[in-house]
Amino acid sequence: MPTRPCWVEIRTRSLENNLRFLASLVAPHGDLLAVVKANAYGHGLALCAPAAVRAGATWLGVTSAEEGVAARALCPDARMLVMGGVFPGQGTDVVRHRLTPAIWEPFQLNEIEVAARTAGLAPRSFPVHLELDTGMSRQGVDDAGLAAILPRFNADSPLKLEGLMTHLFAADESDGRVTHEQLARLEQAVDQMQAAGHQAEWLNAGSTAAILAGEAGSIAALAARHNMKPLIRPGLALYGLAPAFDPPFAGEEPAQLQAAHRQLQPVLSWKTKIVSLRSIDAGDVVGYNGTFVATEPMQLALLAVGYADGLDRMLGNRFSVLVHSERAPIVGRVSMDQTVIDVTGIPGVAPGDEVVLLGMQGEQTVSAQDHADATDTIPWEVFTRIGQRVARVEV
Ligand SMILES: *Cc1c(COP(=O)(O)O)cnc(C)c1O
């Protein structure tokens, strides 16, 4: 059955190239974990998780146990880090599907410990990563919490403290000050762990911005001082985008960021088709509440896309999409399922013509950053709000 023409094209080869590029930046220092949470940033887990593994990823990062179960069905051999913690009742699935949870609350330890004992697992055999709050105040233990939780990893526990994990929350700030403070706090926590007689294999820290800011080396050095291996967790760059550093680097950009600008390839294009065309006269209005008033005769095209597909309603009267490799402005409000564009002066436009909402057409590009700038958000949100009903197609 032909579907309504509103779809996303995923170039898995680009994702594979991006992953290999990131691995080349990280490899001298440590291992890379490919973040595929939130349906692979809206790109489709079923396409992206296997592509990441094909390109050499040994670790995948998901938000939740349910995402982990879905990823496990696609990638039987990959390590799977559940970054958002576990919830009551999820322990059995976590153990059965060999997911590696980030944990920091005693109830999470209880949940996994009970499930591991029930499964008859040997002492110190089920790996977990303990999250440390090094300043973000989102998840993780502080120093006192660490002291309280370490004794839980005693010799009879079926749990193995495999990793210490933290999140660098300001690595896109070009001065690196906050990141260095966080790494100093991380180092104190590692010292505290070792002083208590524990050792973890992985030091699990850093995302896209940390790698592109050139911090993989400092994370690796910290790990090496403590006989640990760094595990770095890029998401956005896998999908082909470098984050906007704020403020921009004053002098030369770090070599890693320069290389990223040359080498990262966007993975996703979002397309629709022209449904029908109409001509309107000066004085006619367009869309809900007539927020657009024609000042001259115009040619309009109707698109099969609306805010229920993830096209932000804020784009009404303030954004352009691509038709016949030209920019066509959105006129009037974006409706739930439909949008009208101005194709006046673009010759030969006909129903069925392809329209690019995000991606390239001819020489023109509409990027996720363009969408983000127009709607006062970030590319991460642009990607993840593309609706479930929009098919993800591999190209
Ligand atoms: C989403 C996420 C990442 C990846 O972040 P990017 O900025 O997309 O590279 C890494 N770590 C954690 C804990 C995350 O939640």
Image (spheres, rainbow, N blue to C red):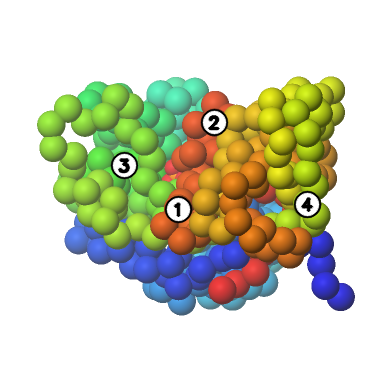
Q: How far apart are marks 1 and 2 (CA)?
A: 17 Å
Between label 2 and label 3, give the one nearer the viewer.
2
**Which is more N-terminal, label 1 or label 3?**
3
Q: How far apart are marks 3 and 1 (CA)?
A: 30 Å
Does the closest atom of ligand 1 sit within 8 Å of the Cβ of label 1?
no
| Label ID, residue 364 | 1
Q: Distance between the residues labelled 2 and 3?
A: 26 Å
Residue farthest along the right direction in this orientation: 1
Between label 3 and label 4, give the one nearer the viewer.
4
| Label ID, residue 277 | 4
Q: Which residue shows up at 75% across the image and 28% down it?
A: 282
Between label 1 and label 4, give the one nearer the viewer.
4
Whether residue 92 appears in this view of the structure is no
Percent coordinates x, y for residue 297 in the rendering: 72, 36
Dot 1 falls on a residue whose secondary structure is strand
Which quarter of the figure has residue 279?
A: top right
Dot 4 falls on a residue whose secondary structure is strand
> Mark 3 = which residue?
210
Percent coordinates x, y for residue 310 in the rendering: 70, 43
Q: Distance between the residues labelled 2 and 4?
A: 26 Å
Q: Distance between the residues labelled 1 and 4?
A: 23 Å
Vertical side of 169 occupied by 337: above or below: below
Between label 1 and label 2, give the one nearer the viewer.
1
CB within 8 Å, label 1 to label 4: no
* Quarter of the image with the N terminus in it: bottom right
> Mark 2 = which residue?
374
